[in-house]
Every structure is written in structure tokens, then in C-alpha cells.
Amino acid sequence: MSNFYLCHNPVMHNPESSIHYVYHEDSPRFFAGLMEIIPANTFNHFAYGNRNKLFIYLRGDGQMQLYLLLVYQNLDRATVKMDKALKEAVIWYCSALNMEDEKKYGKQSKFKLLQNYNLLTPGLQIVHLEGIDRYLLSYDSGVKSFDSPLAMDRFLSVDLKYTDLQLEEGNHNVFNPSLKEG
């Protein structure tokens, strides 16, 4: 597995939900932020224009968490290898997190990457934040939140130029942290 490092700057004020930074020293080199997305009544919308990977982490105690790995600096300006490297970073981070959580909860944790919307839209994932009825859209060059499916559909059609055929049928990932698996 490639070399990844968790980074921490104690004098820097982190964004509210930012928990760690990840540096990848092999090609493609990148510096990314890792944030937990906490759906709450005070959910702040966001729109980031960088490569990213959303994933769900299920702790050993059954608590479900949604994370966003967001590339801040693509040091090699990589495009082709970046998706594979981000998946490796997720696997690496979840393995490290599990080592601590398994000691704490006495049971191994799991994680899953999100499903693509459909075969015609590779790299496009939609997450319904069920508890607050909001939507997250992850695509190759960004991640954005929406209040309604209509607003999200408009963005997909107008801004990202997806056709009606591409968006006709697909999968929404659902995230509801109040549902515990045991």
C-alpha cells in the first residue's frame, strides 16, 4: 500500500467538521482534508470544487458516520490515478481508525464506499441525508449539498451537463446515523 500520513497542525484553526489531514507521498502526491459530515438541524451547505471521496464508516458499537476526503492540493496535478489513490487513502484511514475503535468497542469496524448513480455516470454519487432530508452530490471535480432533489437535478443538467438519458434511473445512497447496526 502507498505511503499515507496523518497530519496535524496544532496552531491552525480547523473548519468545524475537519478532523484530520492526509498526505500521500507517492505518485500522485496530494494533501487532503478528512471531514466528518454530521447531518443536523443546523446543517451548513457547502460546495467544494476538488477531487473527493465520500464513505460511510460503521464503528464497532454500531454508530454510522459519513466522511468526506477532499483533496486540497493535487501536487502532481494528477487526474487518472487520483481516484485509485483516494480509495487507497480511505482504506488506509479506516484501517487506522479501526485499530483504535476495536480496542474501545471490542468489535471490528467496517466501511463502505458509495455506489455510483448508474453505469452511465461513473464517479457520480448521490447521498440522501435522510434525517434532515438534504442531498449530497459527489462528482469527479467537486462535492455539493442541496435542499431538494429538484435543485440537485437542475445542477446535474445545467451545470454538469448530464443528459436526461444518463439521469433517467439510478441509485441514491442513504445515510441515517440514527439507524444503528448491531
Image (cartoon, grey):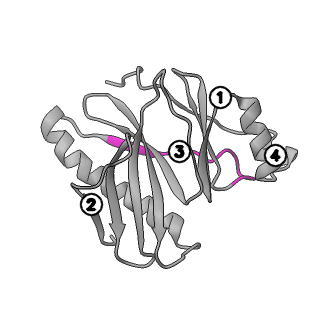
Q: Is residue 57 above or below residue 176?
A: below
- Tell me how far mark 3 sits from mark 2, CA to CA: 23 Å
- Tell me how far mark 3 sits from mark 4, CA to CA: 21 Å
Which residue lies most toward the right here? 164
Say which element carries label 1.
loop
Q: Position of residue 63 (x, y in %)?
A: 32, 28
Residue at image x 39%, y 46%? 35
- Tell me how far mark 4 sits from mark 2, CA to CA: 37 Å
Residue 166 horizontal side relative to residue 61, left or right: right
Tag 2: residue type? Leu
Magenta stretch bounds: 110-121
Residue at image x 55%, y 60%? 51
**Residue at the spot of label 4:** 157
**Residue at the spot of label 1:** 147
**Residue at the spot of label 2:** 6
Quarter residue 10 falls in: bottom left
- Which is closer to the viewer, label 2 or label 1? 1
Q: Of residues 49 and 105, which is closer to you in this image?
A: 49
Q: Earlier in the sequence, mark 3 or mark 2?
A: 2
**Residue at the spot of label 3:** 114
Q: Position of residue 56 (x, y in %)?
A: 43, 40
